Image (tube, rainbow, N blue to C red):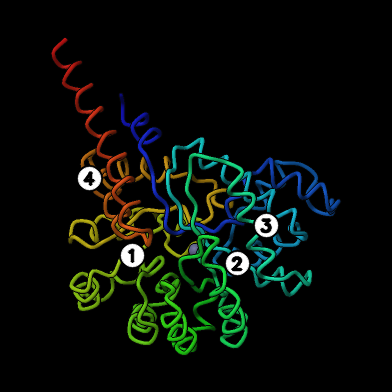
Amino acid sequence: MNINEICKEIPKVELHFHLTGAIPIPAFWKLVQKYDNYETIQSIDDLEKKFQYRDFIHFLQVWRWKNQFIREYDDFEFVAKEVSLDLQKQNITYVEAFVSASDFINNFQLELPEIYYSIRKGLNSVSGTKVNIIGDLVRNYGPEEGNKQLEEIKELKHLGVLGIGIGGSEREYPPEIFRKVYEKARKYGLKTTAHAGEVVGPENIWSAIKSLKVDRIGHATSIIQDVELIKFVKDHEIPLELCPGSNVKTGSIRNIGDHPIKTLFDQGLLISVNTDDPHMFQTTMEEEFMTLYSQFGFNIQEIYDISKRAIASSWTQDAEKEVLLSKLNNFAQNISENLNQSSKI
Ligand SMILES: [Zn+2]
């Protein structure tokens, strides 16, 4: 098996993954057609062109533009099913997926619990990939709206909701303004993460740690500017959800070579590699793994190792982590037996 095949076949785990940023393009095209908006998008090609970004602000604009094509509860069920099928095909065995409901509640008068129920229905219609949910409070709606959503989210744990997070503009809506919301989430037994240090310096990562007491941090690329912060995150074993492909596509880092993933890996931090919004960034987990290999010099053992760190960073039960780990170990063992076999010939 060559490296491409290994990256394709390896059982994968994703911890930083937005459900509505992961809609396969043909499925999204169906939604565009359903709502008959042909002003700027007349073909799948146009759609792919639309998903190119000048910078992070532009990406957030396109993100919101895209949300106009998901208007009904049935659309969420459809999206969840299509995303699950896509995950299954790629041998992604476990995902913690953000659900960012705010735009849909606000624009189409949908109810948060119904959105979550529809998503769960769609996810359950496909086997092979277990998907748990993280409620993204979407920081641009502010802490009051976040608090309102939290009260509804806490009643939905039976749908596989494990925690909350905040995506959106971290510059205008820094972590600390959500302090009380996060405090309450912890009391409700929910895990917490926050996008921080993606387009703002290490001060936002410190704030996510100190004010929000997060269990994990999304992106965190600017950690590399602060040696003390790296030490703190390592000593306290705070997992980082890294998304190198996303960071290049949004322009939050200029070149892939500037990404700190290898440095953080070598220093022993609990990191994972993730796609963030795979179909909006035209990436896959397979490609992210290939990038680790070709751009950063990760060897196969190190790719197994980063996969193990992802499992360790997940919020699922220990029994499930054991299952994920044994799938990974079995895969690694088969590969090494095959390699031994072929070297004997
Ligand atoms: Zn994200």
Q: Is residue 181 above or below residue 96?
A: below
Q: Nearer the viewer, mark 3 or mark 1?
A: 3
Q: Is residue 302 left or right of residue 69?
A: left
| 204 over 32 or under it: above or below | below
Give x and y (percent) for residue 119: 63, 56
How many residues crowd around disc 1 within 10 Å: few (fewer than 14), some, or many (20 or more)? many
Write down the residue under mark 4: 302
Q: Which residue is mark 1?
A: 240
Q: Earlier in the sequence, mark 2 or mark 3?
A: 2
Residue 105 lies in quadrant: bottom right
Does the numbered disc 3 mark a residue whose Cβ is under 8 Å from ligand 1? Answer: no
Vertical relation: 95 (above or below) 163? above
**Classed neighbour count for the residue bearing mark 2: other residues with Cα under 10 Å, few (<14), some (14–19), many (≥20):** many
The location of residue 135, given as percent across then percent down, is: 54, 69
Badge 4 or badge 3: first in the primary sequence: 3
Q: Are marks 3 and 1 in contact (CB under 8 Å)?
A: no
- Give the labeled residue for mark 3: 118
Q: Which mark is residue 100?
A: 2
What amino acid is at disc 4?
Glu
Q: In x, y percent, where is residue 264?
A: 24, 61
N-terminal-most mark, 3 or 1: 3
The kind of residue on which mark 2 rests is Ser
